[in-house]
């Protein structure tokens, strides 16, 4: 199939599953599309038992032609991160800067080692041992919270503003730390990198600082352009070019593309919105990027659901995946509680902050994309099954119950409706 045909099939399925969700189960679009896609995917995978091998082969051929890693990390993520950053207020981030910084750096690194160590122990007990370095690799790809999943869910969760800023701000920045950690550990696993403190620090500075500078430079140039015109069509095109241009330039310079897009989006969403846009432009711009965000979110969760068909399941891996869910939650709780303990001497925290930050730390497509990017082998199969089970549990169970946890913790806040028709 051609690229156009593949995109057509995916968009048609996304529209159909979104419609079915609105007419029947009425869950948030991303969760509903994921559930329906998983059900269809598993149904197709099981159709071979009834002699329907042609349908199964056709579906597998379509999925095999989609490079999930490339489509997400070098495609959809660009627009989703930019859309999310546009609506984050820098004043809110400044008030939570230490919490966000610790969660997105120390928290991710601590979680990587906790998940890696416990996974190595559990897999050994199950008779499916993995080298410790691959368990650390699993810890690196599953520890960062996913900005796409987080931003998509907290919109309907009724989270208080300060907590929403913590969760959203952390998710926008910690994927860069997680990807850098993943790259370092992957190179170490391949034994192609002489890992020293200097090498790790140099790679981190190049990725983080370089990505930030690219985002600032590209965002400031776009800001100057926006300030000199008043034409919302052209201004929307400029922001679209900014998101794509900043990501690709950073990627070419071997720095962090996601971080460049986030910084550029924050600059335009704050300085640009306040000083370079008319009321009409702000309204049209928000409508455009909200639509882009909704379409790509639904498409991404469709792909996550369909990936259920290409994963090899065994009883041992399923057991490991179930235990990995508990391990990931424990690691998240430990890293959040540790951050709170460090900061408690300097600032106070609302009741239930640790529990909500733990349960609201959703994993999503980035983790699946990184797991799929691993070279083939037994290690990849084990990591992929565990990753997929954590992501599905995170989106469906944590995503659908986060609002109830918030309502129990803050009973004066109205519980958010799950139905999109409300």
Image (cartoon, helix red, strand yellow):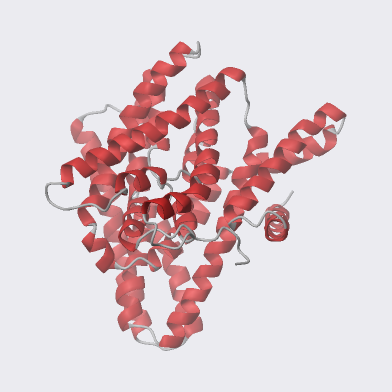
Q: Position of residue 273 (x, y in %)?
A: 35, 78
* Viewer-closest of 93 and 244: 93
Vertical relation: 279 (above or below) 47: below
Vertical relation: 29 (above or below) 104: below
Q: Residue furthest front?
A: 411
User: For the point 35% across and 53% down, which residue is it?
Assistant: 167
Q: Position of residue 59 (x, y in %)?
A: 75, 41
Q: Residue furthest right?
A: 51
Q: Residue furthest left?
A: 345
Q: Relative to residue 136, is residue 372 drawn left or right?
A: right
Q: Is residue 189 visible?
A: no
Q: Determine the image quadrant of residue 359.
A: top left
Vertical relation: 50 (above or below) 85: above
User: For the point 45% across and 63% down, which residue is it?
Assistant: 414
Q: How many marks?
A: 0
Q: Determine the image quadrant of residue 275.
A: bottom left
* Viewer-closest of 415 and 387: 415
Q: Position of residue 365 (x, y in %)?
A: 51, 45
* Viewer-closest of 409 and 222: 409
The C terminus appears in which quarter of the rendering? Answer: bottom right
Q: Relative to residue 403, is residue 274 drawn left or right?
A: left
Q: Is residue 38 visible?
A: yes
* Viewer-closest of 408 and 175: 408
Q: Position of residue 50 (x, y in %)?
A: 86, 29
User: For the point 50% across and 14% down, which residue is it?
Assistant: 128
């Amino acid at each position: 199939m051609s690229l156009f045909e593949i995109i057509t099939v995916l968009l048609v399925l996304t529209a159909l599953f979104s419609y079915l969700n609105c007419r029947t189960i009425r869950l948030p679009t991303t969760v509903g599309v994921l559930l329906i896609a998983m059900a269809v995917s598993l149904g197709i995978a099981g159709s071979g038992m009834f002699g329907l091998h042609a349908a199964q082969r056709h579906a597998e051929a379509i999925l095999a032609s989609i490079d999930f890693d490339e489509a997400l990390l070098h495609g959809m993520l660009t627009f989703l991160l930019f859309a999310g950053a546009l609506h984050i207020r820098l004043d809110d981030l400044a008030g939570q800067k230490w919490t966000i910084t610790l969660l997105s750096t120390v928290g991710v690194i601590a979680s990587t080692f906790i998940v890696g160590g416990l996974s190595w122990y559990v897999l050994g007990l199950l008779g499916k041992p993995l080298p410790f370095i691959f368990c650390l690799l699993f810890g690196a790809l599953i520890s960062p919270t996913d900005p796409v999943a987080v931003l998509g869910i907290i919109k309907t969760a009724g989270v208080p503003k300060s907590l929403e800023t913590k969760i959203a701000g952390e998710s926008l920045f910690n994927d860069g730390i997680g990807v850098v950690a993943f790259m370092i550990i992957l190179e170490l696993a391949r034994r192609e990198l002489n890992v020293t403190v200097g090498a790790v620090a140099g790679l981190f500075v190049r990725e983080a600082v370089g990505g930030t500078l690219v985002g600032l430079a590209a965002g400031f140039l776009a800001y100057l352009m926006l300030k000199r015109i008043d034409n919302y069509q052209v201004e929307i095109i400029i922001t679209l070019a900014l998101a794509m241009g900043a990501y690709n330039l950073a990627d070419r310079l071997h720095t962090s593309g996601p971080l460049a897009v986030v910084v550029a989006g924050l600059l335009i969403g704050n300085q640009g919105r306040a000083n370079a846009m008319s009321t009409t432009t702000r309204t049209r711009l928000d409508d455009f990027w909200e639509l882009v965000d909704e379409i790509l979110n639904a498409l991404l969760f469709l792909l996550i659901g369909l990936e259920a068909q290409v994963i090899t399941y065994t009883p041992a891996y399923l057991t490991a995946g179930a235990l990995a869910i508990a391990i990931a939650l424990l690691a998240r709780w430990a890293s959040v509680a540790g951050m709170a303990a460090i900061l408690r001497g300097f600032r106070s925290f609302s009741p239930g902050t640790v529990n909500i930050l733990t349960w609201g730390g959703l994993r999503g497509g980035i983790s699946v994309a990184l797991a799929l990017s691993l070279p083939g082998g037994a290690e990849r199969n084990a990591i992929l099954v565990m990753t997929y089970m954590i992501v599905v549990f995170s989106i469906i169970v944590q995503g659908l119950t986060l609002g109830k946890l918030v309502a129990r913790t803050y009973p004066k806040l109205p519980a958010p409706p799950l139905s999109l028709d409300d």
